[in-house]
Image (spheres, rainbow, N blue to C red):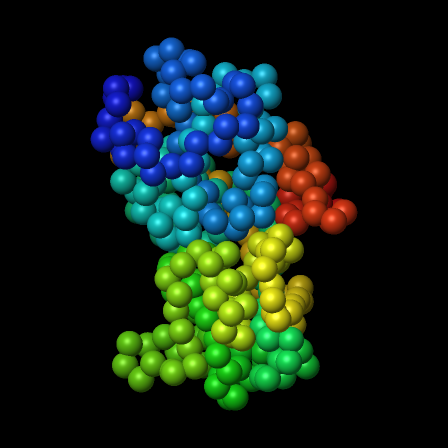
Amino acid sequence: MELAESGRRRFLRFFSCGLALGAAILKPGSIAGRSPLFLGVTTSVENSGLLAYLVETFSVGRDIQIRAVTAGTGAVLNLAARGDVDVVLVHSPDNERRFLKAGYGIDRRAVMRNRYVIVGPASDPAGIGDAADAVGAFTSIATRKAPFLSRGDESGTHHAERAIWRLVGIEPDQASGRESWYRETGSGQGATLNIAANTNAYTLTDDATWATFSNPGALELHVDKDEPALRNLYSIIRVNPERHAGLNVQDALAFTDWLTSKSGQSAILSFQVNGRPLFRPVGDLSG
C-alpha cells in the first residue's frame, strides 16, 4: 500500500540530500504518482564521491527518482528500522546481522570492499609505522598515550575501531576510567579527519575517504595492511516491506539487482581516483 506523503516522506524531503545528477531522477514531481527511492548510505560512500557516481550511472535510462540520506551505519540502520528509507548500503557486518535477525531487513547482499587505514601525525610519536599490524599500532598508541580520535557515532568505522581495541585488550572509551588521550568526536569521517589534522591525533578511517580527503595537513598514512582487522565489507539490504507500509519495493529491488549485477560491479571498479579504484567489487571483476 502506497502512503501519500507519509510522515517519513515529509521528514526526508528536508533531511535527505536529493542527488540532482540526471534528468531521470531530478525533477520533483516529474514522475506522477510515483514515490522516490529513499536510499540510506554510509558517509564513506558519499565522501569518496562513489555515491554520486553510482546514482548517475544507475539513473541512465531509468525513470527513478532517488533521495539519498547519508550518515554513519548505526544511524542509517536506525532510519531503516523506522521505515524511513527503502534500502541501505552500509558496512558493519555484526550490526547488519542483528538488523536482519530483528526482521527489519531482507535480502542482504555483499557489494564491495576496501580497507581501513590508520593515519596520524607525520612525526608519528607513537611509532606505529613500525607496527606489524593494526593491533600492534593501537597497542603503541595506548602505551604512549598518544592522542587518538574516535568517531564515537556507532558507525561501521567506529565498530571496527572498537573491535581492534578489544583485540588489544583494553576499552579506552569506557564511561568510568576513560583514557584522557582517547577522545570521541561524535562526527562523520570527514569531520573527524579535519579534527585529527588540527590536533595532531591518530584516527582510523577507510582508505577511500582518506584518498579523497582534501585537508590532510600534517597527517600521514601509517598503517595500510591487508589483514582481517582492517578489512571493510559493504553490503546492501532492502528494508522489510512486511514491517512498513509505503516502501518503494520495486525500485529498491531494481537498485539492489543492478548494484550486484555485472553492470553495477563494473561501475564500482571503474570509479577511480588518480588511476586507482577506491572500492573493489566482491565479484571476480576485482582481480
Q: What residue lies at 58% left-to-right and 73% top-to-bottom?
A: 120
Q: Tell me the residue at 51%/69% (across/down).
A: 198
Query: Could you tell me how many numbered marks the image carries?
Result: 0
Residue 223 seen in the current view? no
Q: Residue furthest top?
A: 32
Q: Nearer the viewer, residue 100 or 69?
A: 69
- The image quarter containing residue 262 is top right
Q: Is residue 132 above or below residue 48?
A: below
> Residue at coordinates 45% horizontally, 19% vertically from top-left?
27
Q: Residue furthest left?
A: 7
Q: Quadrant of residue 114?
A: bottom right
Q: Position of residue 112 (x, y in %)?
A: 59, 46
Question: Residue 214, position in %: x, y?
Answer: 60, 55
Q: Is residue 137 visible?
A: yes
Quarter in which the N terminus is drawn: top left
The answer to whether residue 92 is left or right of residue 55 is left
Where residue 77 appears, x then y in whole percent? Answer: 36, 46
- In the image, residue 124 above or below residue 230: below
Left or right of residue 272: residue 169: left
Give the vertical position of 213 relative to 254 (above or below): below
Name the residue rendered at 32%, 43% in the picture. 79
Q: Is residue 74 above or below residue 267?
A: below
Residue 216 at what x, y percent from top left?
60, 63
Q: Nearer the viewer, residue 270 or 227?
A: 270
